[in-house]
Image: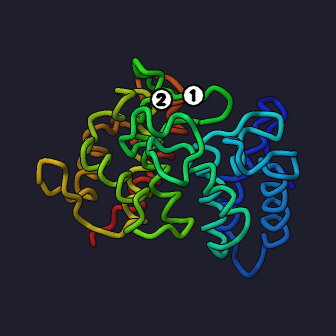
Amino acid sequence: GAIYTREHYHKTATTPATMGFHAAHTEGKYHALTAAATRFERKIQWDSDEGIDPSDPRYGGQGYGSKKRPDLSNTGMFIDALETLGTDKNDPAIQEALKFISNSQNLDTPHNSTKFGALINDGGFYYTPAGDGETKAEKSENGGLRSYGSMTYVGFKSLLYAGVSRDDPRVKAAKQWIADHYTLEENPGMQQQGLYYYYHVFAKSLAAYGEPLLVDSKGVEHHWRRDMIATLAKRQRSDGSWVNTADRWYEGDAALVTGYSLLALSYCGEK
């Protein structure tokens, strides 16, 4: 049921492919394919089938395959696919993923079993709590894993897709981090790296939250959809494409980055 290229062996390419086939799913054409793909995605989730105890920070996460440590980016896409397919929020795979997501947040709560939650405690998210933990930003002086923009939006969206209430401390803290770091000039904490991935998850997350305006920590209202449209219009190249000159995570590839941009714009219809 997996969908991936053997050259890269990134088995979690199955997840975005599942969403693509679902979008083309007219008259049940790809039902068998998406069902098989979803079974595969569930199989490689880090849980008791791999001998992982629920107290382990790896529990519930998704990586690039069953032999690769889990991370929030892949876990967020897994939640996206389950949401796209209409999976019940109480489904065991979603609730297991929620454990990993909560452990990836810089927040000291009963839902976080890691040593990292209390070290920075700003409500943002980082790449993975697995092993010694990893952030793509940098560590703080006390050994904390600094939050950054793209992972915070992934974490925020994933909490919502997992059915966590807006009044839950995890959602409220993530939203406050977003208010404190609202910008489309950079991926907060990463400058220009991963900028278009950030644009995609920024738009998808705020669309999932469902409010047309976001008030930042200075009390300024932002119509985030209009901001995103204006930003991408400014950055579009003359041939219609987008590309990131900070070429990390394949963002020097115009095909990929243009895809991210179009996905971001798909959430920006006026509301």
Callout 2: SS: loop
Residue 238: quadrant of the picture: top left
Farthest left residue? Answer: 219
Q: Residue at x 53, y 70 (%)?
A: 163
Of residues 150 and 94, which is closer to you in this image? 94
Q: Amino acid at mark 1?
A: Glu
Depth order, front residue of 99/162: 99
Where is 177 relative to 207, above or below?
above
Q: Position of residue 254 (x, y in %)?
A: 50, 34
Residue receiving disc 1: 134
Tally of numbered tags = 2
Dot 1: element: loop
N-terminal of the pair, mark 2 or mark 1, is: 1
Query: How far from the left and from the top, in percent, is residue 169?
Result: 40, 59
Asked whether, in this view, residue 242 is left or right of residue 214, the answer is right
Task: Kindly report the distance in space between the C-alpha atoms of the residues bearing marks 2 and 1.
Answer: 7 Å
Q: Amino acid at mark 2?
A: Leu
Rendered residue at 83%/34% (across/down): 67
x and y, in percent, of residue 174 in the image: 38, 51
**Residue 28 location, quadrant:** bottom right
Dividing the image into 4 quarters, which one contains the C terminus?
Answer: bottom left
Measuring 18% from the left and 49% from the top, which residue is drawn there? Answer: 217
Residue with the mark numbered 2 = 145
Residue 208 placement: quadrant = bottom left
Is residue 197 visible to the viewer in this orientation of the structure? no
